[in-house]
């Protein structure tokens, strides 16, 4: 058993998920790292880490991953429901299959992640749900239609969950990044949308490092359990919308 509590992270193989894994590992926490790319998880080389290849759309797989990791390192004290995809594009020409993928991963996947740990946190009267949203969960963009919808969903669910979990001393925190240097553009197939995104990113001097976001998440988690940063909105200084 480790001295510090177990941290679970979905979508841990790259981007903010990877950066959070590294930050919490450096802080001495054992980890449950979940992603579809097991080779990337193995490549992180982090100690005291249970690595699970799983899709957040598979509710049973998440429950089993949590059960296995908790048997080794004790209860999950923070679930970072981070896994998500951004199939940005013109809503009139975008394949509906792209909508399905975003809705299933960004909304159902988040709920499956919460489901895997929430009752344990309620029973222990301790824990943190870290919910990955986006600046696109606070305002809309013409070529982000369904993506915005999924992130508004995360905000709404998180607000409701926060009220539900508060009497049990469990925290629900929303993280809403703007343009961050991650692999998010890999999911954009619409050439016009991709070009516009890259142009906007260049115009503001580029995104910021995922490490900056990870440090904020770690700092918010390390506050006393009776203190909560309800939402973290982090963007490049030049990003105003």
Image (spheres, helix red, strand yellow):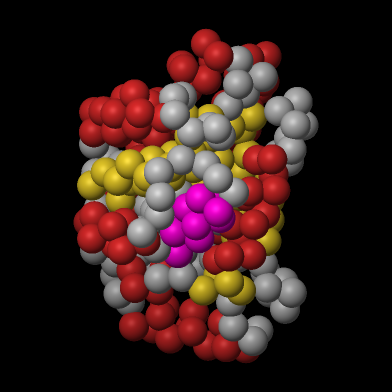
**In the image, is residue 121 above or below residue 238?**
above
Looking at the image, is 26 positioned above or below residue 40? above
Q: Which residues are magenta?
A: 15-26
Q: Main secondary structure of the magenta part?
A: helix
Percent coordinates x, y for residue 237 in the rendering: 74, 74
Of 11 and 174, which appears nearest the observer?
11
Quarter-of-image position of residue 45 = bottom left
Q: Residue at x 50, y 57 (%)?
A: 22
Q: Residue furthest top?
A: 123
- Quadrant in the picture for the C terminus: bottom right
Magenta span contains residue 156: no
Residue sitting at 46 percent across and 40 percent down?
30
Horizontal arrangement in the rendering, residue 129 relative to residue 13 (left or right): right
**Magenta includes 16?**
yes
- Residue 84 in view here: no
Placement of 47 over or under 79, stated as above or below: below
Residue 135 screen position, x and y as percent: 60, 59
- Image quadrant in which you'd find residue 62: top left
Q: Nearer the viewer, residue 230 or 29?
A: 29
Q: Quadrant of residue 129?
A: top right
Residue positioned 55% across, 32% down in the render = 3
Q: Which percent across, then down, holds residue 92?
A: 33, 67
């Amino acid at each position: 058993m480790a001295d510090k509590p177990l941290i679970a992270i979905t979508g841990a193989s790259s981007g903010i998920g990877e950066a959070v894994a590294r930050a919490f590992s450096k802080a001495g926490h054992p980890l449950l790292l979940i992603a579809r790319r097991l080779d990337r998880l193995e490549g992180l080389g982090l100690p005291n880490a249970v690595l699970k290849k799983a899709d957040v759309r598979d509710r049973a797989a998440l429950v089993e991953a949590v059960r296995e990791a908790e048997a080794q390192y004790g209860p999950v004290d923070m679930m970072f429901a981070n896994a998500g995809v951004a199939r940005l594009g013109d809503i009139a020409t975008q394949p509906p299959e792209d909508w399905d993928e975003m809705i299933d991963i960004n909304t159902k996947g988040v709920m499956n992640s919460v489901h895997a740990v929430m009752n344990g946190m309620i029973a222990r009267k301790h824990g943190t749900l870290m919910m990955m949203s986006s600046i696109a969960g606070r305002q809309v963009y013409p070529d982000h239609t369904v993506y915005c919808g999924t992130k508004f969903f995360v905000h709404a669910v998180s607000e409701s969950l926060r009220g539900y979990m508060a009497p049990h001393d469990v925290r629900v925190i929303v993280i809403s990044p703007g343009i961050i240097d991650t692999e998010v553009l890999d999911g954009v197939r619409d050439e016009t949308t991709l070009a516009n995104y890259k142009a906007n990113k260049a115009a503001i001097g580029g995104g910021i490092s995922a490490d900056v976001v990870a440090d904020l998440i770690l700092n918010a988690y390390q506050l006393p359990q009776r203190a909560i940063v309800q939402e973290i909105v982090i963007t490049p200084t030049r990003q105003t919308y």
